[in-house]
């Protein structure tokens, strides 16, 4: 150990064990509302690229004006790591005092909190935008984010019938097995149209570069949360589907139109900036996320440092 | 302590005790050469402001292409901290593997390494640009950076006669006392013209917003290293002095012309981009830092994340 200012260190195991979803979701909600109200400082993300390794590192910093703390997050993705038995994602969230600048805590979460704050935001979106009755939930993707999104929905959504789409049978089977053990009625499929025909609450959480869902497949009254498009070159919904929707909500209007799920329809001239609402304003009740039972609604989550700030605060509050 | 990947933590005391100036200077030299050769990734700095406290935080990240590590530096300045008995500057330098993204070391240096890498760069500049014979060294400023610059010069410059300028007698006396104890012949002054008339190797290390040195005061053959102007609104040398110089060198051409010491003469149209050389090219021998004994030469140090990368590597190399 070391002398000097005390920096608390939390391992990913400690963070996962102490995590309280309700508190985290409530704080992320507050953060998104503050962001849309213009009360958050978010520095433009820093990117370092390691081309020879198909790897990158992103640094995101955020501060909610007047708050006691601010955070700096370093997250790396080194996709050849598994070849040597290491996880692809690493990094940490660092919490500093906004009164003195002194570092207070290191959250060595290896990306877990980033995945979790995205899932918590998916939960907030579902509460605000999903139809009143959901006969089946649809999940596209079978990775960590797909797991977390479905678990997070489980806290606010009574439906336990779930269609899951994936490209590979092994991933589908593992996903289904996990949730069957938790009492879910699981329906795996490799046909996204089949999923769309059955589900009115859909979450897409894939790294897909091409649309997976088409406009004509989607039932009236469906809500879709699109999580995958966090940088240029990713797309999960067809432009026609985005254009067809009655309500479009993004965590960040500017990010969504620049590189998120709505950027493709925006660039094609099918939607304008005025056609997208910001999630914080919906959560604050300033704008409606759903106006009628038959609305098709879409939420695009691109990721914001204020979510990191708020989930870090929730972890520190739990640890106190 | 914690489980998981081992992150070595170094306190400022450990860092200061282990510090080897020659190794650090050599590595910073390599880093500046690589930067000017276009082999360094430096993300634009992130800034968070705490207006109510006159405080700020800067995040700088850097990676020398092909290197084993990259660094992220968080440095804060909270200038009301001393009122509660805390240092103004805090922060840390974090070293990550550039092969896997795994965090390797936290250098909790509270800004000491940033100050030291600037001083080491001043030393490199003096070796490359100072006149062959220096009768007296002039230091403007009496703070930490002034101390470090003079100590760093002592490693490469035999002259022990030093004029020091400051606004306050107490600061001047403390500075002189410190260096007299180390065998220096110290001459304090509150008149910068008097200093300029006696010194042909001058280092300005103040946060001044107005020029402290005028063109007509400077003797032929003088070298000046300007350290203070690290953001907009700072200036230590008059525009006429910058325009008069025979050689102008900047650690970063783009930063110097945007917000550094040379930005004022550049904006006034007195110098053009072609009138400024980059330090890495001088250190590499591609450009000359001094062409004749009577040249007036000026170097502007604005600060680069590659200096952080390199000094961090030198600390880790010492610790091995």
Image (cartoon, coloured by chain):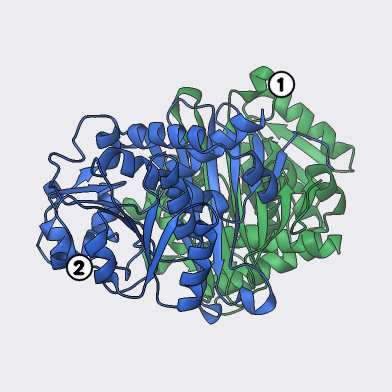
Chain colours: A green, B blue
Q: Using the image, name the chain to which the residue with label 2 belongs.
A: B
The answer to whether residue A212 is seen in the rendering is no
Residue most toward the top?
A83
**SS under mark 2:** loop
**A292 and A232: which is toward the camera:** A232
B318 relative to B212 in the view: left or right: right
| Residue B204 shown left or right of residue A68 in the figure | left
Bin the neighbour count of mark 2 within 10 Å (Cα to Cα): few under 14, some 14-19, many 20 and up. some
Q: Nearer the viewer, residue A313 or B48?
A: B48
Disc 1: CA contacts within 10 A as few (<14), some (14-19) or many (>=20)? few
SS class, disc 1: loop
Percent position of residue A251, x then y: 54, 61
Is circle 2 on the same chain as circle 1? no
Residue on which disc 2 sits: B238
Asked if B289 appears above or below A277 in the picture, the reply is above
Query: Residue at (66%, 23%) from the top-left corner?
Result: A82
Q: Name the quadrant containing residue A64.
A: bottom right
Residue A85 is labelled as 1
Q: Residue drawn 46% across and 77% down?
A: B169
The residue at 24%/70% (across/down) is B193
Along the line of sight, which residue is nearer the eye, B258 or A127? B258
């Amino acid at each position: 150990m070391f002398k000097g200012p005390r920096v608390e260190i939390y391992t990913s195991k400690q963070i996962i064990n102490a995590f309280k979803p309700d508190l985290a979701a409530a704080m992320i909600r507050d953060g998104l509302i503050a962001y849309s109200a213009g009360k958050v400082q978010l520095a433009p993300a820093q990117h370092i690229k390691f081309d020879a390794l198909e790897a990158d590192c992103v640094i995101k910093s955020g501060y909610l004006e007047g708050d006691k703390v601010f955070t700096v997050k370093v997250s790396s993705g080194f996709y050849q790591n598994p070849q040597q038995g290491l996880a692809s994602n690493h990094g940490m969230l660092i919490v500093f005092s906004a009164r003195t600048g002194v570092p207070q805590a290191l959250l060595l979460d290896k990306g877990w909190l980033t995945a979790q704050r995205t899932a918590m935001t998916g939960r907030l979106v579902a509460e605000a935008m999903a139809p009143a009755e959901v006969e089946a939930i649809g999940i596209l993707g079978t990775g960590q984010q797909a797991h977390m999104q479905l678990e997070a929905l489980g806290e606010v959504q009574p439906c336990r019938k779930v269609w899951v789409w994936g490209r590979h049978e092994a991933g589908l089977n593992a996903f289904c097995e996990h949730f069957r053990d938790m009492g879910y009625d699981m329906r795996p499929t490799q046909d996204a149209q089949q999923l769309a025909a059955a589900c009115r609450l859909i979450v897409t959480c894939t790294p897909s570069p091409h649309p997976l869902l088409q406009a004509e497949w989607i039932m009236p009254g469906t809500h879709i949360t699109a999580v995958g498009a966090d940088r240029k070159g990713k797309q999960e919904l067809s432009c026609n589907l985005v254009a067809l929707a009655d309500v479009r909500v993004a965590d960040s209007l500017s990010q969504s139109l620049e590189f998120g799920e709505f950027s493709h329809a925006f660039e094609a001239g099918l939607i304008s900036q005025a056609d997208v609402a910001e999630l914080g304003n919906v959560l604050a009740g300033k704008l409606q996320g759903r106006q009628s039972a038959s609305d098709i609604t879409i939420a695009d989550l691109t990721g914001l440092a204020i979510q990191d700030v708020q989930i870090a605060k929730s972890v520190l509050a739990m640890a106190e």
